Structure formats: structure tokens, C-alpha cells
Amino acid sequence: MVGFAEGADGDASFSVAEITDVASVGGFSTLQVYGFTTDMELGVDESVLLSFNVGEGLDAESFEFWHRDYAVSPWTLIDPDLASYADGWVNFTVTGFSDYALTVPEPETYALVFGVLALTAVFSRRRR
């Protein structure tokens, strides 16, 4: 969902496309990946609110937001100025249009990390 301010002047082309060939970003499975394209210029102090419908029951504290410049740069972790999660929708603000991904580390990822840490502790104790 994309909203524009009331009284916005002029015409602009705008398109949104789901990016389906990105299964993971930053080592985590993606929930949603979209590319946003427009010829509209944002002012210096303007931002855009993006909303992804990801379903209910997720841990909002573990969401990670990623950005890249239209498949020509690597994904970078971003910290949006405003982010919220309610009724299955994740909302966050950005200052430009390009590719955005939303990830949530899955429980299996945490289990793997903690498992590796536990094995490391066991092996280091046995060496002593």
C-alpha cells in the first residue's frame, strides 16, 4: 500500500513489483521483497510510508529492514525513522524509492546459533 499526500501536484509514474528471486538477505529468510520505481522526486525533508502485509503473530522486535539500489548494489541493513507492526501490517518510512526487503530471523536460525555456541563451549572445556 502506498499513499500520497493530499493536494499533491502534477503527474508521476509509479510501479511496485514483488521481487521473487531473493530468498534470503543478511542470512535470514525474507518475508517480503519489493521494488519501487517512480519518476517522482522527493524533497529533502520528505519521506514515504511503506506497508507490507506479513500476517499476524510475528515478533516485531526481530524485524530487520534492508535496502538496495535497484539490484545494482548489495543489500544494506537500515534503521527506519518510523516502524510499526499492527494487525499483520509492517509500516516503515523511507526517504527514497528502490528495493526494500523485510526479514525476520526464524526460530531455527536462533537454535542454530545457540547450538553452535553450546558446542564451542563444550569443546573448549574438553580441551582444558
Image (cartoon, rainbow, N blue to C red):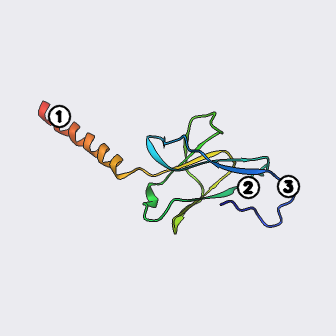
> Quarter of the image holding residue 125?
top left
Q: Which residue is mark 1?
A: 123
**Mark 3 and mark 1 in contact (Cβ < 8 Å)?**
no
Q: Which residue is mark 2?
A: 46
Disc number lying in front (2 or 3): 3
Q: Which residue is mark 3?
A: 11
Q: Residue at x 49, y 42 (%)?
A: 23
Q: Residues within 10 Å of mark 3 (few under 14, many from 20)?
A: few
Disc 2 residue type (three-letter): Glu
Q: Residue at x 44, y 55 (%)?
A: 62
Residue 52 visible somewhere in the drawing: yes
Quarter of the image containing the N terminus?
Answer: bottom right
Q: N-terminal of the two: label 2 or label 3? A: 3
**Position of residue 80 measured from the top left corner of the image (x, y, whole percent):** 58, 53
Q: N-terminal of the two: label 1 or label 3? A: 3
Quote the CA–CA distance across marks 1 and 2.
53 Å
